[in-house]
Image (spheres, grey):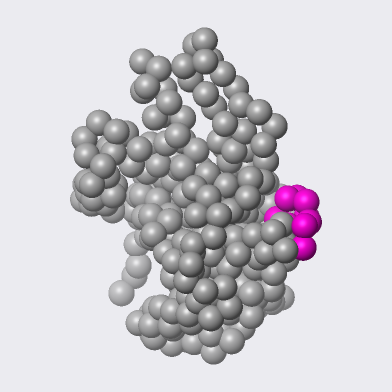
Amino acid sequence: MVAFLRFLINGISLGSVYAIIALGYTMVYGIAKMLNFAHGDVIMVGAYIAFCAMAYLSLPPILAVLLAMVACTALGIVIEGLAYRPLRQAASLAVLITAIGVSYFLQNAALLIWGANPKSFPSVFSVGAIRLFEGELVISSETILTIISNIVIMIGLTLFTGRTKLGKAMRAVSEDKGAAELMGINVNRTISLTFAIGSALAAVAGVLLCSTYPILMPTTGSMPGIKAFTAAVFGGIGSIPGAMIGGILLGVIEILGKAYISTELGDALVFAVLIIVLLFKPAGLLGRPVREKV
Protein backbone atom coordinates (compact mmCIF):
# COMPACT_ATOMS: atom_id res chain seq x y z
CA MET A 1 0.00 0.00 0.00
CA VAL A 2 2.78 2.44 0.92
CA ALA A 3 4.67 1.56 -2.25
CA PHE A 4 1.56 2.23 -4.35
CA LEU A 5 1.05 5.61 -2.69
CA ARG A 6 4.69 6.46 -3.35
CA PHE A 7 4.34 5.60 -7.04
CA LEU A 8 1.03 7.49 -7.23
CA ILE A 9 2.51 10.66 -5.74
CA ASN A 10 5.55 10.44 -8.01
CA GLY A 11 3.20 10.00 -10.97
CA ILE A 12 1.15 13.06 -9.98
CA SER A 13 4.36 15.06 -9.59
CA LEU A 14 5.70 14.01 -13.00
CA GLY A 15 2.26 14.49 -14.52
CA SER A 16 2.12 18.02 -13.09
CA VAL A 17 5.27 18.88 -15.07
CA TYR A 18 3.71 17.37 -18.20
CA ALA A 19 0.55 19.38 -17.51
CA ILE A 20 2.42 22.70 -17.27
CA ILE A 21 4.21 21.96 -20.55
CA ALA A 22 0.94 20.80 -22.14
CA LEU A 23 -0.70 24.10 -21.18
CA GLY A 24 1.77 25.85 -23.50
CA TYR A 25 0.94 23.47 -26.35
CA THR A 26 -2.79 23.71 -25.83
CA MET A 27 -2.85 27.52 -25.62
CA VAL A 28 -0.88 27.95 -28.83
CA TYR A 29 -2.96 25.38 -30.68
CA GLY A 30 -6.25 26.65 -29.28
CA ILE A 31 -5.58 30.22 -30.41
CA ALA A 32 -3.12 30.06 -33.33
CA LYS A 33 -4.26 26.61 -34.57
CA MET A 34 -0.68 25.42 -34.93
CA LEU A 35 1.59 22.97 -33.13
CA ASN A 36 4.78 24.53 -31.79
CA PHE A 37 7.10 21.52 -31.70
CA ALA A 38 9.94 23.81 -30.58
CA HIS A 39 8.17 24.17 -27.23
CA GLY A 40 10.19 21.33 -25.68
CA ASP A 41 13.42 23.11 -26.56
CA VAL A 42 12.22 26.34 -24.96
CA ILE A 43 11.89 24.24 -21.79
CA MET A 44 15.55 23.29 -22.14
CA VAL A 45 16.62 26.92 -22.68
CA GLY A 46 14.69 28.02 -19.58
CA ALA A 47 16.35 25.32 -17.49
CA TYR A 48 19.83 26.31 -18.73
CA ILE A 49 19.24 30.00 -17.98
CA ALA A 50 18.03 29.19 -14.46
CA PHE A 51 21.04 26.90 -13.99
CA CYS A 52 23.50 29.61 -15.10
CA ALA A 53 21.80 32.19 -12.89
CA MET A 54 22.15 29.97 -9.81
CA ALA A 55 25.50 28.32 -10.54
CA TYR A 56 27.46 31.21 -12.05
CA LEU A 57 25.70 34.38 -10.86
CA SER A 58 24.79 32.97 -7.41
CA LEU A 59 21.25 34.31 -7.70
CA PRO A 60 18.59 32.92 -5.35
CA PRO A 61 16.29 30.33 -6.96
CA ILE A 62 13.26 32.63 -7.17
CA LEU A 63 15.24 35.27 -9.09
CA ALA A 64 16.75 32.57 -11.32
CA VAL A 65 13.27 31.30 -12.20
CA LEU A 66 12.03 34.84 -12.90
CA LEU A 67 15.06 35.49 -15.12
CA ALA A 68 14.40 32.25 -17.01
CA MET A 69 10.74 33.22 -17.47
CA VAL A 70 11.65 36.66 -18.82
CA ALA A 71 14.25 35.19 -21.21
CA CYS A 72 11.89 32.47 -22.47
CA THR A 73 9.06 34.98 -22.86
CA ALA A 74 11.30 37.08 -25.11
CA LEU A 75 12.44 33.93 -26.96
CA GLY A 76 8.84 32.85 -27.56
CA ILE A 77 7.92 36.26 -28.99
CA VAL A 78 10.99 36.24 -31.26
CA ILE A 79 10.25 32.70 -32.49
CA GLU A 80 6.64 33.61 -33.25
CA GLY A 81 7.58 36.84 -35.01
CA LEU A 82 10.43 35.47 -37.13
CA ALA A 83 9.42 31.87 -37.80
CA TYR A 84 5.64 31.56 -37.55
CA ARG A 85 4.06 34.94 -38.31
CA PRO A 86 5.23 34.98 -41.96
CA LEU A 87 3.53 31.57 -42.37
CA ARG A 88 0.18 32.62 -40.93
CA GLN A 89 -1.62 31.85 -44.21
CA ALA A 90 0.66 29.01 -45.27
CA ALA A 91 -0.20 25.31 -45.34
CA SER A 92 0.00 23.35 -42.10
CA LEU A 93 2.90 21.27 -43.44
CA ALA A 94 5.05 24.38 -43.94
CA VAL A 95 4.41 25.47 -40.34
CA LEU A 96 5.21 21.97 -39.06
CA ILE A 97 8.52 21.82 -40.95
CA THR A 98 9.42 25.29 -39.66
CA ALA A 99 8.66 24.22 -36.07
CA ILE A 100 10.96 21.21 -36.45
CA GLY A 101 13.66 23.49 -37.88
CA VAL A 102 13.37 25.89 -34.93
CA SER A 103 13.63 22.90 -32.58
CA TYR A 104 16.88 21.69 -34.17
CA PHE A 105 18.25 25.23 -34.19
CA LEU A 106 17.67 25.64 -30.43
CA GLN A 107 19.18 22.23 -29.65
CA ASN A 108 22.32 22.89 -31.67
CA ALA A 109 22.65 26.42 -30.29
CA ALA A 110 22.52 24.91 -26.79
CA LEU A 111 25.24 22.42 -27.78
CA LEU A 112 27.49 25.27 -28.95
CA ILE A 113 26.86 27.45 -25.89
CA TRP A 114 26.72 24.92 -23.04
CA GLY A 115 28.29 21.81 -24.55
CA ALA A 116 27.04 18.23 -24.58
CA ASN A 117 28.20 17.23 -21.10
CA PRO A 118 25.37 16.72 -18.56
CA LYS A 119 25.14 19.29 -15.78
CA SER A 120 23.90 18.69 -12.26
CA PHE A 121 20.96 21.00 -11.60
CA PRO A 122 20.95 22.56 -8.11
CA SER A 123 17.98 22.22 -5.78
CA VAL A 124 15.48 25.03 -6.21
CA PHE A 125 13.28 24.48 -3.19
CA SER A 126 14.43 22.38 -0.25
CA VAL A 127 12.78 22.97 3.11
CA GLY A 128 12.50 19.40 4.28
CA ALA A 129 10.14 16.60 3.39
CA ILE A 130 6.85 15.26 4.68
CA ARG A 131 7.19 11.82 6.27
CA LEU A 132 4.15 9.58 6.64
CA PHE A 133 3.57 6.02 7.86
CA GLU A 134 6.48 6.23 10.32
CA GLY A 135 8.87 7.44 7.66
CA GLU A 136 8.04 4.77 5.05
CA LEU A 137 6.47 7.36 2.72
CA VAL A 138 8.57 10.47 2.06
CA ILE A 139 7.17 13.34 0.00
CA SER A 140 9.95 15.71 -1.06
CA SER A 141 9.62 19.49 -1.11
CA GLU A 142 10.22 19.46 -4.89
CA THR A 143 7.20 17.14 -5.33
CA ILE A 144 4.98 19.41 -3.24
CA LEU A 145 6.17 22.52 -5.10
CA THR A 146 5.54 20.91 -8.50
CA ILE A 147 1.98 19.85 -7.67
CA ILE A 148 1.08 23.21 -6.10
CA SER A 149 2.61 25.10 -9.04
CA ASN A 150 0.51 23.09 -11.48
CA ILE A 151 -2.71 23.84 -9.60
CA VAL A 152 -1.94 27.55 -9.23
CA ILE A 153 -0.97 27.93 -12.92
CA MET A 154 -4.07 26.10 -14.14
CA ILE A 155 -6.39 28.21 -11.96
CA GLY A 156 -4.58 31.40 -12.96
CA LEU A 157 -4.83 30.63 -16.69
CA THR A 158 -8.50 29.69 -16.40
CA LEU A 159 -9.28 32.99 -14.66
CA PHE A 160 -7.11 34.93 -17.10
CA THR A 161 -8.77 33.53 -20.23
CA GLY A 162 -12.26 33.75 -18.75
CA ARG A 163 -12.33 37.11 -16.97
CA THR A 164 -9.71 39.47 -18.39
CA LYS A 165 -9.94 41.59 -21.53
CA LEU A 166 -6.79 40.02 -23.01
CA GLY A 167 -8.06 36.54 -22.20
CA LYS A 168 -11.37 37.23 -23.91
CA ALA A 169 -9.44 38.55 -26.91
CA MET A 170 -7.57 35.24 -27.04
CA ARG A 171 -10.83 33.32 -27.01
CA ALA A 172 -12.21 35.53 -29.77
CA VAL A 173 -9.13 34.94 -31.95
CA SER A 174 -9.47 31.22 -31.27
CA GLU A 175 -13.07 31.22 -32.53
CA ASP A 176 -12.58 33.35 -35.66
CA LYS A 177 -9.50 35.42 -36.48
CA GLY A 178 -11.26 37.41 -39.21
CA ALA A 179 -14.24 38.34 -37.06
CA ALA A 180 -11.96 39.20 -34.12
CA GLU A 181 -9.93 41.55 -36.33
CA LEU A 182 -13.12 43.25 -37.53
CA MET A 183 -14.05 43.83 -33.88
CA GLY A 184 -10.80 45.73 -33.32
CA ILE A 185 -8.66 42.96 -31.81
CA ASN A 186 -5.01 42.96 -32.82
CA VAL A 187 -4.65 39.32 -33.90
CA ASN A 188 -0.85 39.37 -34.26
CA ARG A 189 -0.37 40.89 -30.82
CA THR A 190 -2.81 38.40 -29.27
CA ILE A 191 -0.98 35.43 -30.80
CA SER A 192 2.38 36.87 -29.67
CA LEU A 193 0.97 37.15 -26.14
CA THR A 194 -0.07 33.50 -26.32
CA PHE A 195 3.46 32.47 -27.29
CA ALA A 196 4.86 34.66 -24.51
CA ILE A 197 2.68 33.00 -21.86
CA GLY A 198 3.37 29.51 -23.19
CA SER A 199 7.13 30.14 -23.23
CA ALA A 200 7.09 31.55 -19.69
CA LEU A 201 5.30 28.37 -18.56
CA ALA A 202 7.95 26.35 -20.41
CA ALA A 203 10.65 28.01 -18.29
CA VAL A 204 8.79 27.10 -15.09
CA ALA A 205 8.33 23.53 -16.33
CA GLY A 206 12.02 23.25 -17.20
CA VAL A 207 13.08 24.30 -13.71
CA LEU A 208 10.56 21.95 -12.03
CA LEU A 209 11.58 19.07 -14.31
CA CYS A 210 15.28 19.52 -13.55
CA SER A 211 14.55 19.92 -9.84
CA THR A 212 12.90 16.49 -9.87
CA TYR A 213 15.39 14.87 -12.29
CA PRO A 214 18.55 16.98 -11.77
CA ILE A 215 20.38 16.19 -15.01
CA LEU A 216 20.50 18.99 -17.59
CA MET A 217 21.42 18.40 -21.26
CA PRO A 218 20.57 20.03 -24.62
CA THR A 219 18.07 17.22 -25.20
CA THR A 220 16.43 17.62 -21.77
CA GLY A 221 13.15 18.98 -23.13
CA SER A 222 12.73 16.65 -26.12
CA MET A 223 11.04 13.61 -24.59
CA PRO A 224 9.07 15.55 -21.92
CA GLY A 225 7.91 17.85 -24.71
CA ILE A 226 6.64 14.93 -26.78
CA LYS A 227 4.90 13.41 -23.76
CA ALA A 228 3.36 16.75 -22.85
CA PHE A 229 2.02 17.07 -26.40
CA THR A 230 0.58 13.59 -25.94
CA ALA A 231 -0.98 14.78 -22.67
CA ALA A 232 -2.53 17.79 -24.43
CA VAL A 233 -4.07 15.53 -27.08
CA PHE A 234 -5.09 13.03 -24.39
CA GLY A 235 -6.97 15.65 -22.38
CA GLY A 236 -8.36 17.46 -25.42
CA ILE A 237 -6.02 19.90 -27.13
CA GLY A 238 -7.27 23.46 -26.76
CA SER A 239 -8.72 22.78 -23.30
CA ILE A 240 -6.84 24.14 -20.26
CA PRO A 241 -8.46 21.72 -17.75
CA GLY A 242 -7.94 18.95 -20.31
CA ALA A 243 -4.20 19.67 -20.43
CA MET A 244 -3.99 19.40 -16.65
CA ILE A 245 -6.02 16.18 -16.45
CA GLY A 246 -4.20 14.65 -19.41
CA GLY A 247 -0.80 15.50 -17.96
CA ILE A 248 -1.53 14.07 -14.53
CA LEU A 249 -3.09 10.90 -15.95
CA LEU A 250 -0.16 10.42 -18.28
CA GLY A 251 2.36 10.83 -15.44
CA VAL A 252 0.49 8.36 -13.23
CA ILE A 253 0.19 5.81 -16.07
CA GLU A 254 3.90 6.13 -16.87
CA ILE A 255 5.11 5.68 -13.28
CA LEU A 256 2.70 2.84 -12.45
CA GLY A 257 3.50 1.15 -15.76
CA LYS A 258 7.22 1.26 -15.07
CA ALA A 259 6.69 0.05 -11.48
CA TYR A 260 4.27 -2.81 -12.08
CA ILE A 261 4.66 -3.84 -15.73
CA SER A 262 8.08 -3.04 -17.19
CA THR A 263 10.61 -0.25 -16.94
CA GLU A 264 11.43 -0.62 -20.62
CA LEU A 265 7.77 -0.56 -21.71
CA GLY A 266 6.70 2.40 -19.57
CA ASP A 267 6.96 4.96 -22.37
CA ALA A 268 5.33 2.60 -24.88
CA LEU A 269 2.42 2.11 -22.47
CA VAL A 270 1.81 5.87 -22.39
CA PHE A 271 1.42 6.10 -26.16
CA ALA A 272 -0.62 2.86 -26.28
CA VAL A 273 -3.14 4.36 -23.84
CA LEU A 274 -3.30 7.50 -25.99
CA ILE A 275 -4.08 5.43 -29.09
CA ILE A 276 -6.85 3.57 -27.24
CA VAL A 277 -8.39 6.83 -25.98
CA LEU A 278 -8.30 8.43 -29.43
CA LEU A 279 -9.91 5.39 -31.01
CA PHE A 280 -12.98 5.82 -28.78
CA LYS A 281 -12.85 9.60 -28.21
CA PRO A 282 -10.85 11.30 -30.99
CA ALA A 283 -11.28 14.80 -29.52
CA GLY A 284 -9.67 13.75 -26.22
CA LEU A 285 -11.19 13.48 -22.77
CA LEU A 286 -12.46 17.08 -22.55
CA GLY A 287 -12.20 18.07 -26.21
CA ARG A 288 -15.20 18.99 -28.32
CA PRO A 289 -15.68 17.58 -31.83
CA VAL A 290 -15.57 20.39 -34.41
CA ARG A 291 -17.91 20.12 -37.38
CA GLU A 292 -16.89 21.95 -40.52
CA LYS A 293 -19.23 22.87 -43.35
CA VAL A 294 -17.98 21.94 -46.79
* Point 54% across, 64% down: residue: 44
Instruction: Check residue 59 for magenta coloring.
Output: yes
Residue sitting at the far front:
117
Q: How far from the left and from the top, in percent, is residue 190?
A: 66, 71
Along the line of sight, the residue nearer the viewer: 262 or 79: 262
| In the displayed structure image, the side of residue 110 where residue 276 appears, left or right | left
Q: Residue at x 22, y 39 (%)?
A: 262
Seen as rendered, the residue at the extreme top is: 134
Above or below: residue 29 compared with residue 258: below
* Residue drawn at x 66%, y 46% as measured from the top left: 124
Count numbered badges in the picture: 0
User: Quick check: 265 left or right of 70?
Assistant: left
Residue 70: name its quadrant. Answer: bottom right
Q: Residue at x 68, y 64 (%)?
A: 52
Residue 110 in sight:
yes
Q: Nearer the viewer, residue 230 or 54?
A: 54
For the N terminus, the image quarter is top left
Q: Position of residue 140 (x, y in %)?
A: 57, 31
Examine the rendered structure and indicate whether residue 263 appears above or below residue 46.
above
Instruction: Work out whether residue 10 or residue 240 is closer to the camera in this orientation and state it.
Output: 10
Left or right relative to 232: residue 141 = right
Q: Is residue 92 magenta?
A: no
Return the x and y of residue 268 as percentages of the image width and height. 23, 50
Q: Give residue 139's position: percent from left, percent from top.
A: 54, 27
Q: Which stretch appears magenta?
A: 57-67
Provide the major secondary structure of the magenta segment.
Answer: helix
In this rendering, would 224 be left or right of 49? left
Q: Observer-nearest residue: 133 or 186?
A: 133
Whether residue 180 is visible: no
Image quadrant containing the C terminus: bottom left
